[in-house]
Amino acid sequence: MDRLRAMTVFARVVEARSFSKAAETLNLPRSAVTATVQRLESHLHTKLLQRTTRRVSPTPEGEEYYRRCVEIMAAVDSADETLRELGTQQPRGLLRVDMPGALARNVVLPRLGEFRQAYPKIELMVSITNRVADLAQEGIDCALRVGQLQDSTLVGRRIGEMRFVTCAAPDYLARRGTPRGIADLADHDLVVYFSGRTGRPLDWDFVVGKEVVKIDAKGTVGVNDADANVLCGLAGCGLVQAGAYQVRDHLAQGRLVEVLAQWRPTPMPVSLMYRDSRLGAPKVRAFAEWVAGLFAADPDLR
């Protein structure tokens, strides 16, 4: 039995809480994952996992063994990294990355060819979602997140700050007038952005001096996707608050017009998240440095 491989498979099952999900992320048959864990338990003479019809969870002994496995795999990764640096080998292997759709389509994917040229031995799998993915359960190495960080089990590196503008299509403003103050928004249609996770509409806000003024966004159109939000603005559905990086070309070409420019919405931090065990992996570090460079070069995101 290849014990290091068995440890890797066992750790992935613990993180995914599922043999099937672990098999998917390891690109192995489910039967092979099950057999590997069974052989490991037999070798250790210890039950490592509790299996039910809906969930897999580690036993107390399995929890301790998982912790040791993570430490061992991190040490192996560190040793590999040291030798690769000595031999000037490039980072390699499968890298799973998760990010919101708007950032993927407008910032990362258009420049992805540059990353591939710089790191041709990294096999990149990009999942595009607008929900908060569970990195451990889904086998994701790192993820771009917008907003304040909630998951204390992850390591976060802040790589930028997303700035927002309030804008609308010229034909909408011709029909409804241009708001001159925040109070005027009560007489306008606002495209509502709601959370895809909770379904709750998000408030609009404006930085006024040293204070943040929030208003209850109300309108006849609501979306839970940042690009869809911009499309609704272009279609004349109402005023939108959108990432400046998303709408700058539309503003420059007159398809959208910024309003209330003296009171910009509150910027939001953008972070790259990863698990402790992935922190030292050369492939993760390579992607982190590259994507941080993209944000540093963008005036609306740095």
Image: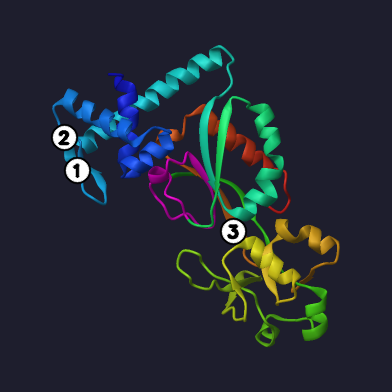
Q: In the image as oriented, which residue stretches furthest toward the top? A: 87
Type of amino acid under label 3: Met
Where 257 sits versus 245, above or below?
Answer: below
Magenta highlight on residue 265: no
Image-quadrant location for residue 213: bottom right
Please tell me whether mark 3 or mark 1 is closer to you in this view: 1
Q: Residue at x 28, y 28 (%)?
A: 36
Type of amino acid under label 1: Gln
Type of amino acid under label 2: Lys
Q: Position of residue 162 (x, y in %)?
A: 64, 56
Q: Position of residue 188 (x, y in %)?
A: 69, 84
Magenta highlight on residue 145: yes
Colouring of the image: rainbow
Residue receiving disc 2: 47
* Residue closest to the eye, 89 or 39: 39
Find the magenta span and give its range.
Answer: 132-153
Image-quadrant location for residue 60: top left
Say which mark, if any, is on residue 50.
1
**C-alpha separation, residue under disc 3 versus residue under disc 1:** 41 Å
Residue receiving disc 3: 268
Image-quadrant location for residue 33: top left
Say which mark, if any, is on residue 187.
none
Whichever of labels 3 and 2 marks the residue nearer the N terminus, that label is 2
Q: Residue at x 84, y 61 (%)?
A: 252
Residues at discs 1 and 2 in contact (Cβ within 8 Å): yes
Q: Position of residue 272 (x, y in %)?
A: 54, 45
Q: Secondary structure at mark 3?
A: strand
Q: Secondary structure at mark 1?
A: strand
Q: Residues within 10 Å of mark 2 (few under 14, many from 20)?
A: some
Where 146 sits versus 34, above or below?
Answer: below
